[in-house]
Amino acid sequence: MNRNKTARILLIIAIIFAIPLLLMKGCQSLAKEIYWSMDCDQFNIDHIELRTGIDIPKITRNYCELSPTQRKVSFQLHKSGKDKAKYAATYFEYTGDHLFSANGTRKDHQWFATLDTITNELIFIIHYLP
């Protein structure tokens, strides 16, 4: 094998390893950007999903209030019947009067979510810890 062929093979091997590594690093950077985003428009739903672990299906946003220590967002859920019941059972606990809730704590935030199955209002409150 001559020196030119060896250099090409090494270049191809380097590219084969570099491309997936760059893609993984790019995805990690995007996930960090979403996790730390403090915006009600760009990545708002993704931010909430990453912080709470609750999948947000097709919705319409009612409002979003954002401060340095808290995010409060209300959505109108576009589910009905068995789909809504399955969604509520998957992510929430029944608290009475057609209300379901969920909550959690992580090292950098606490969150609380409610789903009213009469009005279809889905509310998330995230408290950012110092």
Image (cartoon, helix red, strand yellow):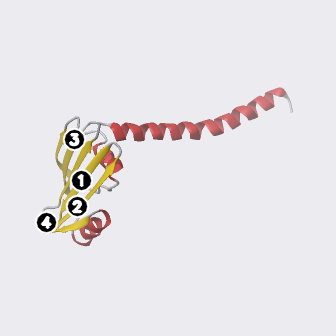
Q: Specify the quadrant of the image occupied by residue 12.
A: top right
Q: Position of residue 21 (x, y in %)?
A: 57, 38
> Where does residue 123 sit, x and y in percent of width and height?
19, 53
> Residue 40 occupies which quadrant of the picture?
top left
* Crowd around label 2: few <14 · some 14–19 · many ≥20 (10 Å): some
The amino acid beneath tag 1 is: Phe
Task: Name which of mark 1 and mark 2 comes first in the sequence.
Answer: 2
Q: CA distance from mark 3 to mark 2?
A: 18 Å
Of all residues, the one furthest to the right in this rendering is: 1
Q: Are marks 1 and 2 in contact (CB under 8 Å)?
A: yes
**Mark toward the viewer: 4 or 3:** 3
The residue labelled by disc 4 is 118
Q: Which of the marked residues, 1 or 3, is nearer the chain's N terminus?
A: 3
Q: Residue at x 47, y 41 (%)?
A: 27
Q: Mark 4: few, some, or many residues within 10 Å (few <14, many ≥20)?
A: few
Q: Secondary structure at mark 4?
A: loop
Q: Which mark is residue 112?
A: 1
- Mark 4–mark 3 Cα distance, whole angstroms, equals 26 Å
**Residue 101, numbered circle:** 2
Q: Quadrant of the C terminus?
A: top left
Residue marked by disc 3: 70
Residue at the spot 30% in from the left edge and 62% down from the top edge = 91
Please tell me which of labels 1 and 4 falls first in the chain.
1
Image check: 86 left or right of 32? left
**Residue occupying the point 80% across, 27% down:** 4
109 or 15: which is nearer to us? 109
- Amino acid marked by disc 4: Ile
Q: Marks 1 and 3, Cα distance to the nearest angstrom?
A: 11 Å
Amino acid beneath label 2: Ser
Q: Residue furthest top?
A: 3
Question: In the structure shown, which secondary structural element does the residue marked by tag 3 occupy?
Answer: strand
Q: Are marks 1 and 4 in contact (CB under 8 Å)?
A: no
